[in-house]
Each structure stands twice: as C-alpha cells, then as structure tokens.
Amino acid sequence: MHQIRYGVDVLPYDRGWNRAAATLLIIGAVLAWRSGTNDTWQDRVERRPQRVRYVTSPFAHEPSAGAAYPPTWLLPVLLVAVPVLLYLAGVRRARQRGGARWSRWRTGSFLSGAGMLGLATSPTLEALAHVDARGHVAQHLLLGMYAPLAPVLGAPLTLLLGSIPSPAAGR
C-alpha cells in the first residue's frame, strides 16, 4: 500500500513476492516427493487406531450427576447476538440523532461478519472440524480471515462516535 500511495514502482516488489512463492512451492513439491508416500490424509485417518473419542465441544459429554451444562449452541448465539444487538441499537440511535444517514452497506457488512463468526463457532462446523481437515481449515479461514474483515468494514467505532453525545465523543 505504501508503494502505491507514494508513486513507487511496484514491479520489483511483485517479482520478489512471486519468487518467494515459487521457491516455497518448489520446496513443498520436493518435500512431498522425498516423503515417498502416495497416501492421502484420508488413507492415514482410516489406518490409525481410533482411540480418541471426538467431542464437539467442552459441553458435549454427558453431564455428571447434578451438574447443569449449557447447550452447545449457546456460545455461538451469544457471540453473534450481543454484538449484533449493540450495533443495531447504535444504528437506530444514529438515525434518531438526525446526523448523516448510516450506510446500509456498513450494516450489512457487520451483520455478515457476525454471521460468519456464528457459522465458524456453530456446533455443526465444530464437529466437522474434529474429524475432517476441511472443516478445520474452514474454521481457520472464517475466524482468521473473513469474519474479522467484515465487521471492520462495518465501522463500529465510527458508529459509536456518531451515536453518543458530542461532549463524550470528544474525550
């Protein structure tokens, strides 16, 4: 970004990153070739002894006598519902204050980020992540790359500053 903003030629940077990527791909191909196995990860999973019982969440086991555990869907609902309700309350308050209209794109972006967070922590994807690498990678992508970006585009701090009284916003 720095190079683009200040008119610097980006071609050398692009070539450097492409060389680094090609080097890593070649190293990975050599390591895969030297490992001498054609097994896929599914083959290895089928051959390994099944000694581990996969648990979908810390609360998925049978509760002990007298213990009450929350349902597995409670954490994802709380992770999504609380920020969404606070954000929508801020949108409503900003509209009531009569300032500039709050963008529906920002609201949609924030809500989609909350939805991705809910999907990544859902019991269904949680269970899939314990038995399938694709579910595990999907959780990483959702939690690490996609879900954080959408709420940032929703500008919750800008909304907060626009919905609180002016003297408090200046502090």
Image (cartoon, helix red, strand yellow):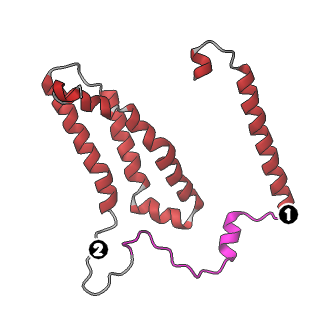
Dot 2: what SS? loop
Q: Which residue is at 25% across, 38% downward? A: 87
Q: Earlier in the sequence, mark 2 or mark 1?
A: 1
Report which residue position mark 1 lands on: 36
Residue 166 location (% of width, % of height): 17, 24
Vertical placement of residue 31 versus 132, above or below: above
Corner quadrant of residue 8: top right
Dot 1: what SS? loop
Tag 2: residue type?
Answer: Tyr
Depth check, mark 2 against mark 1: the one in front is 2
Side of 39 relative to 86 (left or right): right
The answer to which of 32 and 155 lies nearer the viewer is 155
Tag 2 and tag 1, C-beta contact below 8 Å = no
Vertical placement of residue 47 versus 20, above or below: below
Report which residue position mark 2 lands on: 69
Q: Which residue is at 35% across, 33% downward? A: 154
The range drawn in magenta is 37-60
Q: Does the magenta stretch include residue 50?
A: yes
Residue 56 location (% of width, % of height): 44, 69
Q: Callout 2 environment at 10 Å: few (<14), some (14 to 19), or many (20+)?
A: few
Tag 1: residue type?
Answer: Gly
